[in-house]
Image (cartoon, rainbow, N blue to C red):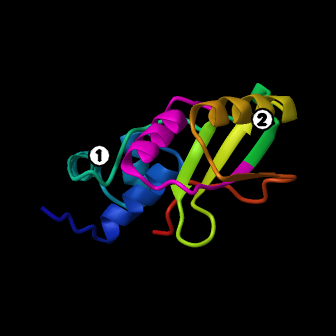
């Protein structure tokens, strides 16, 4: 079943993306509605899978994770067994914040958050001891200019 959002749904979603800790009363007031219809729409969007789990955004640097690396991985292996092993290796490492399989010359890109270069080296050594890769390039982010999870509704 496909769920079609309307303008009111998108306003609710925009408010939830901005700050999911807002009360239903505040969201309803901001979009010009009342609490019960807002709650019903949120419930329906959750059931449809449009709204996923709720979480909080933490300040990585305030918690001592000062280094963000983008790791480019090329592999010469594309068999299902290797891919399963690679996926399990990534899922078991909390340092990996994002992982994407790419089209083009690079097979995968990872976003890895660690305390420092030594932390990255420990991550790297652990990963390559578990999964064979052809080439790994690590790029240190010097400055985060923009980071958001918000979709352009």
- In this rendering, position of residue 65 left or right of residue 111: right
Per the rendering, the mark at residue 120 is 2
On the image, the x and y values in percent for residue 39 come to 26, 45
Residue found farthest to the left: 1
Residue 100 seen from this side? yes
How many other residues sit within 10 Å of disc 1, few (<14), some (14-19) or many (≥20)? some
Q: Nearer the viewer, mark 2 or mark 1?
A: 2
On the image, the x and y values in percent for residue 30 come to 45, 56
What element does badge 1 sit on? Answer: helix
146 vs 104: above or below: above
On the image, the x and y values in percent for residue 136 come to 72, 51
How many other residues sit within 10 Å of disc 2, few (<14), some (14-19) or many (≥20)? many
What element does badge 2 sit on? Answer: helix
- In this rendering, position of residue 13 left or right of residue 58: left
- Return the residue nearer the eye: 119 or 49: 119
**Residue found at x 34% / y 49%:** 51
80 vs 118: above or below: below
44 vs 61: above or below: below
**Between discs 2 and 1, the one toward the N terminus:** 1
Look at the image and tell me in which quarter the C terminus lies: bottom left
**Residue found at x 61% / y 39%:** 96
**Residue found at x 45% / y 50%:** 16
- Return the residue nearer the eye: 2 or 36: 2
Per the rendering, the mark at residue 35 is 1
Look at the image and tell me in which quarter the N terminus lies: bottom left
**Residue found at x 54% / y 38%:** 90
56 vs 44: above or below: above
On the image, the x and y values in percent for residue 94 come to 59, 30
Residues in magenta, as a range = 70-95
């Amino acid at each position: 079943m496909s769920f079609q959002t309307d303008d009111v749904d998108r306003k609710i979603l925009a408010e939830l993306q901005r700050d999911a800790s807002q009360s239903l009363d505040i969201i309803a007031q901001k979009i010009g509605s009342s609490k019960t219809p807002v709650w019903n729409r949120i419930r329906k969007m959750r059931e449809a899978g449009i709204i996923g789990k709720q979480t909080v955004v933490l300040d990585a640097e305030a918690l001592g994770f000062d280094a963000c690396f983008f790791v480019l991985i090329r592999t010469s292996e594309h068999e299902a067994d290797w891919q399963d092993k690679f996926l399990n290796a990534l899922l078991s490492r909390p340092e990996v914040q994002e992982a994407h399989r790419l089209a083009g010359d690079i097979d995968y890109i990872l976003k890895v958050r660690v305390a420092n270069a030594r932390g990255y080296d420990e991550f790297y050594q652990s990963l390559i001891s578990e999964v064979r890769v052809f080439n790994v390039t690590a790029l240190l982010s010097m400055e985060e200019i923009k980071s958001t999870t918000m979709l352009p509704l």
